[in-house]
């Protein structure tokens, strides 16, 4: 079947959005719940002085919350498609009690947010401390086309882990990743926003009790891919002291159909060469009627609604071969050209389940008839060998069989390869979130078990709408507490060591331990037989 590139890119974005849209909706519910709780608890005002002026947040006795803090000037007009510029100083006391606007994106078929979106939120413990606290900076996922820092309520991390958590927005889609010949910053404006947020942290962490010399960057999905990319960016030196990469290894690699089971689906990675990104930009400009040689001026004059017509084309357009990313991040990892900081790295056991189910709901189910065709499209002459390794008879449905192929080939084994590359030069702690009964974050139908699908670990770390959206069992809440402990202990010391929780050995060349994170009623936390379960030796032989 023939599909236009634009249709393919729209489906690619839709795959990421199948889970992140639920996160965004849960975030909105959390904001409403928080507003109701605030009016009932009557929190005290909390004023801090930043380098740009004073802000007024809220202190409820447990956590101090500051929302909607501007960290860069509005990237509009002549600043559209320019690197971010630090926020201008203001007079008086700016309100920081409500979440600010999200960056422009689509949600449920409607355009939301706006270009003036470079804001961040801060959560910090309310109790005084004699020593400066670690700072954790969160980068949200969403396929580079959706998401917002305000959707991730970090109160539990701040309170239970005794850390300061910063959740910034960054530009998305065409606004964050447009590339054109001659355009400075091409393909990396969203990444530049993340760097500007990290610079803001250096200047302002102390105002919240944070230590600018102890900053952990962490993110999931596109946020994890951005985190991994930033480890390879010369511009990030001195800004990152530790990193946590969740479902975002630099080495992720989706061969045709392993991301979405669509015949003709191109292979792709989280990053794009500058030349390919420029080609996408010029195609988008042509689609919108901009003449060759006048693309930038023409696009800057376009209203947001026009640009949204091509927005999904930029779902995987973060460009390397650029000043911020000189090398493909996967190459940089292999060659050891990355920051030598402690790293936690992992993903979920059943990454592909939500994507494959979502594709079925969109009209692209995997069937017994299409399974061999998908194999041939993805693996060519090796299709029979892969079919033999993953026979349909071993799975409850063809969709689950293909989801296992995708989870292993595109996600798990590349993540393992990335961990090995990093562990050769720095300290690495590897994990796999494996709760087979995790919240059904992407609303997979009952006939397709969600398992530990992509993004299913997020409710264990953040409050994404609370119990009305996802309820956890007592055993899952215990796991959530252990995970918050691991994540924040790593931010404190670079070692995820928590009293009362199982030991987490470092991942080394001689001992490639991957810690499985699951509730006690499923076996509890312990070493995973990771390489064997995901058939990484098979995939390594196939690619050699």
Image (cartoon, helix red, strand yellow):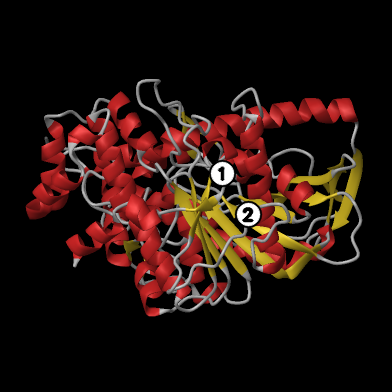
- Pointer 2 with pointer 1, Cβ within 8 A: yes
Which residue ends up furthest to the top in the rendered image? 446
Pointer 2 local density, CA inside 10 Å: few below 14, some 14–19, many at least 20: some
**Image point 64% across, 66% down: which residue?**
495
Classify residue 251 by image quadrant: bottom left
Q: Decide: is 522 above or below 36.
A: below
**Image point 66% across, 29% down: which residue?**
466
Tell me if I can see residue 191 in this picture.
no
Q: Is residue 36 toward the left or the right of residue 464 in the image?
A: right
Q: Where is residue 460 drawn, in percent x and y?
A: 61, 41
Query: Which residue, given by chain and number where applicable, does mark 1 sit on?
Result: 524
Q: Is residue 174 toward the left or the right of residue 133 in the image?
A: left
Pointer 1 local density, CA inside 10 Å: few below 14, some 14–19, many at least 20: some
Q: Where is residue 256 drawn, in percent x and y?
A: 21, 48
Q: Secondary structure at mark 1?
A: loop
Q: Is residue 352 toward the left or the right of residue 107 in the image?
A: left
Quarter of the rendering occupied by the C terminus:
bottom left
Sequence-first tag of 2 and 1: 2
Tell me if I can see residue 235 in this picture.
yes
Q: Which mark is residue 502?
A: 2
Classify residue 96 by image quadrant: top right
Q: Where is residue 21 drawn, in percent x and y?
A: 49, 33
Q: Which mark is residue 273?
A: none
Q: Where is residue 152 drawn, in percent x and y?
A: 63, 42
Q: Secondary structure at mark 2?
A: loop
Q: CA distance from mark 2 to mark 1?
A: 9 Å
């Amino acid at each position: 079947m023939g599909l236009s590139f634009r249709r393919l890119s729209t489906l690619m974005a839709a795959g990421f959005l199948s889970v992140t849209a639920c996160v965004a909706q849960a975030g909105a519910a959390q904001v409403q719940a928080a507003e109701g709780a605030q009016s009932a608890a009557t929190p005290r005002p909390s004023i801090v002085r930043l380098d740009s002026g004073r802000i007024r947040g809220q202190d409820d006795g447990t956590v101090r919350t500051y929302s909607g803090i501007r960290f860069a000037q509005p990237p509009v007009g002549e600043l559209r498609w320019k690197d971010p510029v630090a926020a201008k100083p203001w007079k008086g006391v700016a309100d920081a009690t409500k979440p600010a606007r999200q960056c422009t994106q689509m949600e449920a078929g409607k355009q939301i947010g706006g270009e003036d979106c470079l804001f961040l939120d801060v959560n910090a413990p309310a109790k005084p401390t004699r020593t400066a606290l670690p700072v954790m900076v969160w980068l949200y996922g969403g396929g580079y086309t959706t998401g917002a820092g305000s959707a991730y309520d970090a109160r539990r991390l701040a309170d239970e882990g005794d850390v300061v958590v910063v959740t910034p927005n960054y530009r998305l889609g065409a606004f964050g990743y447009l590339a054109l010949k001659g355009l400075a910053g091409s393909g990396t404006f969203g990444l530049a926003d993340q760097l500007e947020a990290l610079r803001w942290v250096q200047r302002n962490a102390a105002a919240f009790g944070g230590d600018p010399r102890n900053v952990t960057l962490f993110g999931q999905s596109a946020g994890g891919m951005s985190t991994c990319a930033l480890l390879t960016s010369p511009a990030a030196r001195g800004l990152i002291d530790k990193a946590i990469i969740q479902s975002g290894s630099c080495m992720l690699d989706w061969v045709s159909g392993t991301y979405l089971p669509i015949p003709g689906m191109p292979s792709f990675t989280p990053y794009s060469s500058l030349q390919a990104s420029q080609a996408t930009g010029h195609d988008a400009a042509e689609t919108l009627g901009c003449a060759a040689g006048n693309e930038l001026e023409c696009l800057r004059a376009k209203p947001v609604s026009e640009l949204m017509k091509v927005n999904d084309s930029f779902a995987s357009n973060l460009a390397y071969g650029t000043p911020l990313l000189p090398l493909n991040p996967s190459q940089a990892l292999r060659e050891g050209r990355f920051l030598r900081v402690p790293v936690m790295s992992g993903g979920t056991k059943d990454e592909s389940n939500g994507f494959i189910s979502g594709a079925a709901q969109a009209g692209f189910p995997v069937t017994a008839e299409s399974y061999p065709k998908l194999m041939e499209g993805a693996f060519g002459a090796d299709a029979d060998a892969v079919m033999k390794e993953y026979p349909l008879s071993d799975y409850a449905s063809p969709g689950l069989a293909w989801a296992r192929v995708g989870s292993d080939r595109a996600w798990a084994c590349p993540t393992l390869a990335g961990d090995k590359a990093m562990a050769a030069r720095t300290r690495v702690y590897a994990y796999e979130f494996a709760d087979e009964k995790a919240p059904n974050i992407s609303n997979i139908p009952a006939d397709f078990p969600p398992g530990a699908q992509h993004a299913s670990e997020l409710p264990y770390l953040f409050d994404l709408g609370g119990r009305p959206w996802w309820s956890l069992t007592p055993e899952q809440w215990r796991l959530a507490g252990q995970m918050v402990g691991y994540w924040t202990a790593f931010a404190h010391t670079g070692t995820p060591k928590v009293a009362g929780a199982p030991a987490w050995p470092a991942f080394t060349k001689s001992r490639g331990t991957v810690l499985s994170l699951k509730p006690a009623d499923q076996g509890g936390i312990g070493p995973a037989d990771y390489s064997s379960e995901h058939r990484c030796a098979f995939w390594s032989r196939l690619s050699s």
